């Protein structure tokens, strides 16, 4: 490889992974509250800290009181599968897939639950025709496709008078978009995405229509203990007040509380969205100025502003691996290779926990890696 002059400035925090994503600026483990550690999650302090985390999520997300928030096991995957296993089967189902996680819900519906859903697919970088969705069905979709960089444009395609339930996997969308909660019956996410929290825990949001389904319908298949949200036909309300189904990591809870309190210090959702918007704009400028870079999602109306997926001219999987390794070895960018199921390319997280100055500093390093490998 021919020597190419390296840029003078490194990103201060080269953490551009799409999950777990970068910690909030100023984070250090020493700043976490520790009084709940080594205590039972069912102790007074344990339940209080779990409830505090739920209250902070409600406040930052501007979630109406009509919607309940529960902390559940298994990250976003566990939360979404909990919703599928407990509520699907009451009416026909439509699943939308334009990236790997949406495709995973198709697999669950077809091969595990065997409910023969209608499947609307699109290639990476595209989105299905949302006008084709039949809302007499329950509808499963990802708000923001983490592995394709494609998002739904808004919530206008979801009717207010829908018969079925809307199930939104929103794990890389919450805290970055203004989600219309009156259009969402079920939403799931994990702290490790937009907040930069730790993994293993999921968040399940239920609107009143989802609660009605849970209390009026019993699925034909057996439910494992970690999926059970009702008892004697009634919602287990304690789950949504911090009385978790299984034992949570209080360290992960404290980590999430730190991130949520940081979000409050920015002005809440408006502050988080402003940072994400600025990051996406900075990366967009980098792409626009380079003819060898492009957006996998060509249409800006459906392009993610968190998990931004880029095409690299003529790149195959081996080229992308070498490209990403060069930058990681230099401490310029970590974890920017595209998802393994996606077309070969780069994926750069632009959520609120990333500093715009680090996105800007990344541009010359992308040039360096490109020139080094092409030399």
Image (spheres, helix red, strand yellow):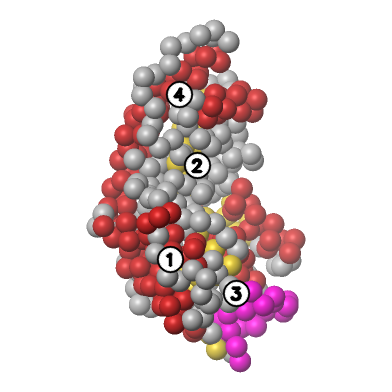
Q: Nearer the viewer, residue 266 or 251?
A: 251
Question: Residue 132 in the image: x percent, y percent?
Answer: 53, 56
Q: Which residue is mark 3?
A: 246
Question: Residue 119 in the image: x percent, y percent?
Answer: 63, 56
Marks 4, 3: nearer the viewer: 3
Q: CA distance from mark 4 to mark 3?
A: 44 Å
Q: CA distance from mark 1 to mark 4?
A: 40 Å
Q: Residues within 10 Å of mark 4 (few under 14, many from 20)?
A: many
Magenta segment: does it hold 231? yes
Q: Residues within 10 Å of mark 3 (few under 14, many from 20)?
A: few
Judge whether 30 appears above or below 321 on screen: below
- For the record, the magenta segment spans 213-232
Q: What residue do we see at 45% from left, 71% from top?
A: 36
Element carrying mark 1: loop
Residue 249 is tagged as none
Q: Which residue is mark 2?
A: 17
Q: What residue do we see at 58% from left, 77% from top?
A: 245
Q: Is residue 167 visible to us here?
A: no
Q: CA distance from mark 3 to mark 1?
A: 20 Å
Question: Looking at the image, which residue sits at the far bottom?
Answer: 232
Q: Residues within 10 Å of mark 2 (few under 14, many from 20)?
A: many
**Quarter-of-image position of residue 264:** bottom left
Element carrying mark 4: helix
């Amino acid at each position: 490889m021919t020597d190419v002059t390296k840029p003078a400035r490194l990103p201060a925090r080269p953490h551009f992974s799409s999950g777990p994503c970068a910690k909030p600026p100023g984070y250090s483990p020493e700043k976490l509250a520790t009084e709940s550690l080594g205590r039972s999650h069912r102790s007074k302090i344990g339940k209080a800290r779990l409830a505090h985390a739920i209250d902070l999520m409600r406040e930052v997300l501007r979630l109406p009181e009509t919607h309940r928030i529960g902390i559940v096991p298994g990250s976003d995957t566990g939360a979404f599968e909990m919703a599928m296993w407990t509520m699907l089967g009451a009416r026909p189902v439509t699943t939308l897939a334009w990236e790997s996680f949406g495709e995973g819900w198709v697999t669950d519906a077809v091969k595990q639950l065997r409910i023969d859903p209608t499947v609307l697919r699109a290639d990476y970088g595209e989105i299905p025709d949302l006008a084709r969705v039949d809302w007499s069905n329950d509808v499963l979709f990802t708000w923001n496709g983490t592995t394709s960089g494609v998002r739904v444009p808004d919530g206008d395609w979801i009717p207010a008078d829908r018969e079925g339930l809307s199930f939104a996997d929103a794990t890389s969308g919450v805290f970055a978009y203004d989600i219309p909660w009156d259009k969402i019956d079920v939403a799931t996410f994990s702290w490790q995405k937009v907040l930069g929290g730790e993994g293993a825990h999921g968040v399940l949001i239920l609107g009143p229509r989802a609660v009605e389904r849970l209390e009026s319908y019993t699925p034909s298949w057996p439910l494992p203990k970690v999926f059970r949200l009702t008892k004697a036909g009634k919602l287990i309300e304690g789950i949504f007040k911090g009385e978790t189904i299984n034992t949570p990591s209080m360290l992960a809870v404290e980590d999430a509380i730190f991130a949520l309190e940081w979000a409050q210090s920015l002005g809440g959702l408006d502050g988080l969205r402003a940072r994400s918007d600025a990051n996406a704009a900075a990366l967009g400028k980098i792409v626009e100025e380079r003819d060898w870079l492009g957006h996998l999602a060509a249409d800006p109306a459906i392009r993610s502003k968190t998990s931004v997926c880029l095409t690299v001219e003529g790149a195959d999987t081996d080229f992308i691996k070498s490209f990403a390794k060069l930058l990681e070895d230099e401490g310029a960018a970590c974890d920017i290779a595209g998802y393994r199921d996606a077309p070969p390319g780069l994926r750069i997280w632009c959520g609120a926990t990333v500093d715009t100055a680090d996105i800007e500093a990344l541009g010359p390093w992308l040039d360096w890696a490109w020139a080094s490998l092409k030399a």
